[in-house]
Amino acid sequence: MNQRRVAFVVFDGFQSLDLAGPYEVFQQTRRYTCQIVAARPGLVRAGSGLPVHAEHGVATLDPDGVDTLVVAGGSGVYEARNDPALTAWIAAAGAGARRVTSVCSGAFLLAATGLLDGRRATTHWARAGQLAREYPAVTVDADPIFIRDGRVWSSAGVTAGMDLALALVEDDLGRDVALAVARHLVLFLRRPGGQSQFSVALWSAQPATDPIRAAVSAIHADPGARHGIDDLAAHAGLSPRHLQRRFTAELGVPPGSYVERVRVEAAQRALAESDDPVEAIARRCGFGTAETLRRTFHRRVGVAPSDYRDRFHTRGTP
């Protein structure tokens, strides 16, 4: 049985779970040969201090023949992308690999080689804006857990690398094998929701002018208050039509959509930090009824309010 060759790229300051999680997923199938490569062979320390032995260095490992390239992320990625030998090896391996992938901020290393140019990609929600600014040739989508664009795959932060690896296994070996691995590792085969369930203000731009700042400040000060177009126009000192146009131009979303998102985030905080009934949270956050909150929450976050509370509720945690 032919073994597919998976090369994991690491560097000093990499995120250990970006390596260990996907590595375990691939190894569970016994159908892949996993290799760890760094700028030089030997000890590489993760950002947490965990020591890992890279058996290969870029000077001695042939980049040809890599089936799947997996580039880890971590705090050291910004220095690593300035290593010409490492980036040259990634570019060479990526050019010939059947699949090129990144985990978390590993997308910065792929972007530095040009492998993400003209493609849609994701990364950790907290780094998405930076990736978009520094690499404008990349279309960055901050919400998905992972994205496939042709032969290039990218994933969100840390544990999302395991979601990505399961998807790669399913693509290669079928759903039954991927499901068996997921069950053994006690994982979702397909995790519900996107990154927006884990972050606050992930998506929001900043207003550029004082009138729009005034409207935005009013929304955030009391998400449950009346925030129709006439109300926001009064806060901004603009006509409703002018407010609609400028708000959308500066923030990239119309006022109604922005209000809805802020209310969802307020509900997220309330669900995680309080024991209040969903009905009370719905009224306080401007949804009116629990059913309206449930429908909006599921559309925006991808999970039900009760599921979100089960995952993120912190009150009374020992």
Image: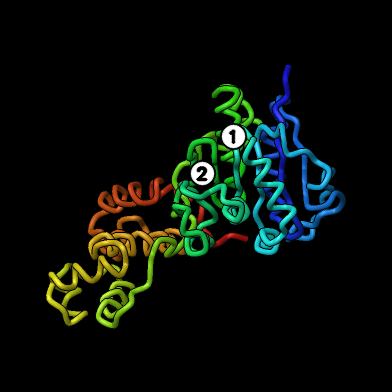
Whether residue 123 appears in this view of the structure is yes
Report the front residue among 119 and 3.
119
Q: Quadrant of the N terminus?
A: top right
Helix, strand or loop for disc 1: helix
Which amino acid is tagged 1?
Leu
* Location of mark 1 (residue): 166
Q: Which mark is residue 146?
A: 2
Find the residue positioned furthest to the right.
42
Q: Residue at x 25, y 65 (%)?
A: 248
As displayed, is residue 289 above or below residue 29? below
Q: Nearer the viewer, residue 22 or 130?
A: 130
Mark 2 burial class by Cα count in 10 Å: few <14, some 14-19, many 20+ = many
Residue 261 versus residue 240 in the image, above or below: above
Q: Which sits earlier in the primary sequence, circle 1 or circle 2?
A: 2
- The x, y position of residue 90, in whole percent, is 68, 47
Pick the quarter of the image with the C terminus.
Answer: bottom right
Rendering coords of residue 64 (x, y %): 72, 35
